[in-house]
Image: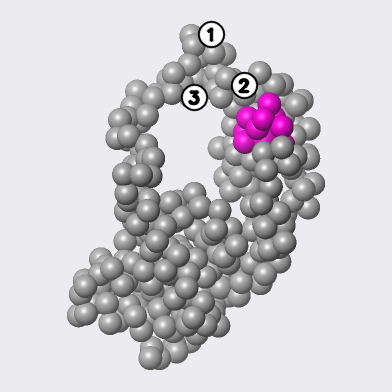
Amino acid sequence: MIDTVTGPRIQSFAVQLKALTDLEARYQPKLSGLRLIESAQDNGLKIQPKHLSCVGLCCFYIAVKSSEEEKNVPLANDLIRISQNRFTVSDMIRMEKIIMEKLYWKVKAPTALRFLRLFHSHIQEQLNDESKKILSLERMESQLKACHCSFVFSKIKPSLLAMALLCFEEQEQHDPEHTDKISEALTSLQQQLNIKDGDLLCVREVVRKCLAEYATTKCSKPNSQRLRWTISGRTARQLKHSYYKITHLPTIPESAC
């Protein structure tokens, strides 16, 4: 068991953890609603296909505005042009208002990604240099993206999913010399979160099955070619200078592991 240390850094983690877990309980979707979505047929969905592009772009816009500095938020008109959609800024504003009302104007819900990064940072502080190499945050973030492609993970608390990913990653490493310390840190964190062993093992198994399926040839994954966004000359001329005159962009990583 890891000794409890009181200090600014540990206290900071405790404060962050409490704030996120308190919010998590308030933002967790109701199972009844999720079951309704899962069982609904195509003709039972309220969003019409012709509105999907507007909904998608508005969700992206809301996410950007809630997580980025104001100077980095693109103009709605530019987003419409870049995405080559036919709706207007007024349409987008109306759709944004509808989405925000559905969310009760709450867009700061704690995500599994936030928990994963917080947990990873906390655990890394307790490890030596060699042990720190075991838990790859980049690999776990890719695994989390794969998990989010499956609807089943919508029913799982973000903190529990983050813990399951960390435990899965630790289990996959066959290096007792370094994983023992990680295991101790995970056990301590599990106790702080009041997560039952059975719940953690169950979700870890769901993660394992999901990633195993994702790694098979049956799962359709993006190819390894560099992604290119082609726009017309007319659209390019209408965009801001900084949006289209870029000499080089790094290759987007596509691997899940």
Tell me the distance, in whole angstroms, between the alpha carbons under discs 2 and 3.
Answer: 17 Å
The residue to which callout 3 is attached is 243
Q: What residue is shown at x 37% (from left), y 40% (from top)?
A: 221
Which element carries disc 2, helix, strand or loop? loop
Name which of mark 2 and mark 3 comes first in the sequence: 2
Q: Secondary structure at mark 1?
A: helix
Indicate whether residue 31 is drawn in magenta: no
Q: Foreground: 250 or 91? A: 91
Magenta span dominant secondary structure = helix
Query: What is the x, y in percent for residue 114?
Result: 52, 60
Q: Nearer the viewer, mark 1 or mark 2?
A: 2
Amino acid type at mark 2: Asn
Look at the picture and state if 55 lies above or below 68: above
Q: Is residue 107 visible?
A: no
User: Which residue corresponds to mark 1?
Assistant: 234
Residues at marks 1 and 3 touching, judged by CB atoms closer than 8 Å:
no
Q: Is residue 237 left or right of residue 103?
A: left
- Tell me the kind of residue under disc 3: Tyr
The CA span between labels 1 and 2 is 14 Å
For label 3, the SS is helix
Q: Position of residue 194 (x, y in %)?
A: 55, 83
Real-space Cα separation, disc 1 to disc 3, in angstroms: 14 Å
Identify the amino acid type marked 1: Arg
Marks 1 and 3: which is nearer the front? 1
| Pointer 2 residue | 85
Q: Quadrant of the N terminus?
A: bottom left
Q: Are marks 2 and 3 in contact (CB under 8 Å)?
A: no
- Residue 77 at x, y = what percent? 65, 23
What's drawn in magenta, residue-wise?
A: 47-57
- 203 versus 226 height, above or below: below
- The numbered mark at residue 217 is none
